[in-house]
Amino acid sequence: MKPLSKLQAAALQWRLNRCCAEVPEIQLILLATVDGFQLVVAGSRREDAELPEKFAAIASSMTALGEAAGKELGSSQRLEAVALDLIDLLVILRMVDGGDQQFVLAAAADKKIGLEALLKIVHDNAFCLEEALR
């Protein structure tokens, strides 16, 4: 795994901080490696002890499970996103193509925002992150 440059990390941190400032329902948003290590994290719960670290590991596991399910069901395409609609929380996991390596953008938000709105926010941010990582 090639680490992010300081410039990339700063730009990605700024992007995620801005996203959380504009959408206060987002409790936690992070960019992680596909093997579960957090790289950049933002949101009101980013300081919760070990939560970002655990969320990165969960995002990695969920995307691996989604990939496996897709293959078993006959999909020949890579996983794009996973959505979890819980009683009081929404979680979106979106693959991010960093060129020579893949990442996961994971967001957890208060349900007030709505699943479609959160999916669009994560998708739009993933697109911007892909451009910044290349």
Image: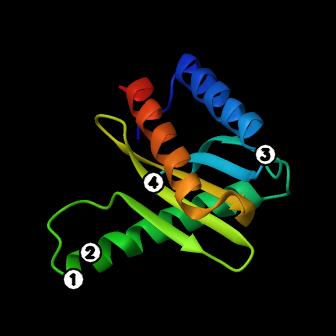
In the picture of the structure, the residue carrying the numbered disc 2 is 70
Where does the image place residue 67, in percent across and percent down from the top left? Answer: 32, 69
- Residue 2: horizontal and vertical position, in percent? 42, 34
Q: Is residue 49 above or below residue 126?
A: below
- Between circles 2 and 3, the one closer to the viewer is 3
**First of labels 2, 3 by sequence position:** 3
Q: Quadrant of the N terminus?
A: top left
User: What residue did someone put label 3 on?
Assistant: 24
For the residue marked with disc 4, what is the amino acid? Arg
Q: CA distance from mark 2 to mark 3?
A: 33 Å
Mark 1 and mark 2: span between their CA atoms? 5 Å
Residue type at mark 3 is: Pro
Q: Nearer the viewer, residue 96 or 115?
A: 115
Query: Between residues 21 and 47, which one lies in front from this camera angle?
Result: 21
Q: Is residue 21 left or right of residue 99?
A: right
Distance CA(mark 3)–CA(mark 1): 37 Å
Residues under numbered marks 1 and 2 in contact, where contact means CB atoms less than 8 Å apart: yes
Q: Is residue 32 visible?
A: no
> Disc 4 to disc 2, how far (Cα)?
15 Å
Circle 3/circle 1 CB separation < 8 Å = no
The image's mark for residue 18 is none
Quarter occupied by residue 13 = top right
- N-terminal of the pair, mark 3 or mark 1, is 3
Asked if the residues shown at circle 1 and circle 4 are in contact, with their CB atoms under 8 angstroms apart, the answer is no
- Chain-order first, disc 4 or disc 2: 2
Q: Which residue carries the number 1 mark?
A: 73
On the rendered image, what quadrant is the C terminus found in?
top left
The image's mark for residue 94 is: 4
